[in-house]
Amino acid sequence: MPNLPLPHILGVDAVGEIVELGEEVTGVHVGDRVIPAAGFTLREEDDHNRPLAISPSFVVPGVHVWGSYAQYMEIPARWVVRNDTGLSPAEIATLPVVLGTSVRAVKQVGEVKAGQTVLVTAGASGSGHMHIQVAKALGARVAATVRSDEKGEFVKAQGADLVINTRTENLAERVKAWTDGKGVDVAIDNVGGSELIKTIDAVRPLGIVVLYGFMGGEHAQINVRELFFTQKQLRGTIFADPEDLQWGLEQVRAGRIRPALDRTFPLNQAAEAHRLIAANQVKGNFVLLPWAE
Ligand SMILES: NC(=O)c1ccc[n+]([C@@H]2O[C@H](COP(=O)([O-])OP(=O)(O)OC[C@H]3O[C@@H](n4cnc5c(N)ncnc54)[C@H](OP(=O)(O)O)[C@@H]3O)[C@@H](O)[C@H]2O)c1
């Protein structure tokens, strides 16, 4: 993160128990099990903005303020959600960012509907596996890309109907064959860079490409003429509104969406967890346990 004042504490997602309340706090109690929102406003007068991320006082823990690689966190009381999922703390800790932002990207920005076809690139990533599950929960058919057969098995288990290994297969050809030559209705792109053009090519005319991530690079070259003739829409998305997380948690409670907890590490092994993520050795999400030795 450029220009971050040091020292800094990383970590967006968290789950825990309230141990202390501010003086004027009502509605929550010491001992309540809660999930902090993965991004919130500092000033109450900004709360009405939608999407919330445009609010002037919107911050993301671990990015703009100190985050969750810690045993205690301070969160504005209006930004905690009661934890009644029945899942283990480690499983819940995988959810807030990927669940909220995936609902935002797939349901709100991508406008995915039952019966549509959806392409998710980097389907085994922490975000991609949740895009697959949200699209399936909405009743869509889902194609997902991976770069190894092992991750192909993982995305199938997340509900992908078609798996494309982009190291050995041609994305456009597989998608066209799967959609009777039309292209998918919506693509959720986690890769960007020079791969983005292939994602755009896999979408049908008038279809939607949601720009969610850029693991393949921040810059892409696109053919403007082709885009306006085919009237495809490129839409950016960032973070989530509280309603997105609430909708996602309802799906979790109903058993339609499941966390993909790959491994846990004690907090003091955070560097090893980061090393494995940088080496693409993660399927779903890792979780750090702040109280473990
Ligand atoms: N818009 C938002 O609100 C939002 C929120 C959170 C994150 N993001 C963005 O989403 C992206 C994904 O983050 P994440 O935490 O989900 O990542 P992650 O869990 O670290 O996923 C990494 C996986 O993506 C695949 N991958 C990595 N580089 C690739 C490349 N060049 N081409 C194709 N696949 C590649 C690899 O899987 P394979 O080995 O199968 O290829 C890798 O295991 C990031 O760019 C992040 O900034 C956006």
Image (cartoon, rainbow, N blue to C red):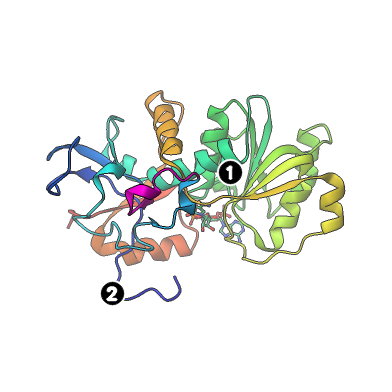
The answer to if 48 sits in the magenta stretch is yes
**Mark 1 and mark 2: span between their CA atoms?**
39 Å
- Say which element carries label 2: loop
- Say which element carries label 1: helix
Mark toward the viewer: 1 or 2: 2
Residues marked 1 and 2 touching at CB (< 8 Å): no
Numbered circle sitting on residue 235 = none
Question: Which residue carries the number 1 mark?
Answer: 152
Q: Is residue 65 visible?
A: yes
Q: Amino acid at mark 2?
A: Pro
The answer to if 25 sits in the magenta stretch is no
Q: Is mark 1 within 8 Å of ligand 1?
A: no
Q: Vertically, is 115 above or below 177? A: above
Mark nearer the N terminus (1 vs 2):
2
Q: 128 or 177: which is nearer to us?
A: 128
Side (left or right) of 114 relative to 125: right
Considering the image in quadrants, where does the C terminus appear?
bottom left
Residue located at (30% from left, 59% from top): 67
Principal secondary structure, stretch drawn in magenta: loop
Q: Position of residue 99 (x, y in %)?
A: 44, 41
Question: Which residue carries the number 2 mark?
Answer: 7
Q: Position of residue 163 (x, y in %)?
A: 64, 40
- The part of the image, by quadrant, that contains residue 110 is top right
Q: Vertically, is 43 above or below 182? A: below
> Callout 1: few (<14), some (14-19), or many (20+) C-alpha neighbours within 10 Å?
many
Q: Position of residue 59 (x, y in %)?
A: 38, 57
Side (left or right) of 282 relative to 287: right
Which span is picked out in magenta? 38-50
Considering the image in quadrants, where does the N terminus appear?
bottom left
Side (left or right) of 42 relative to 223: left
Q: Amino acid at mark 1?
A: Gly
Residue located at (42% from left, 76% from top): 3
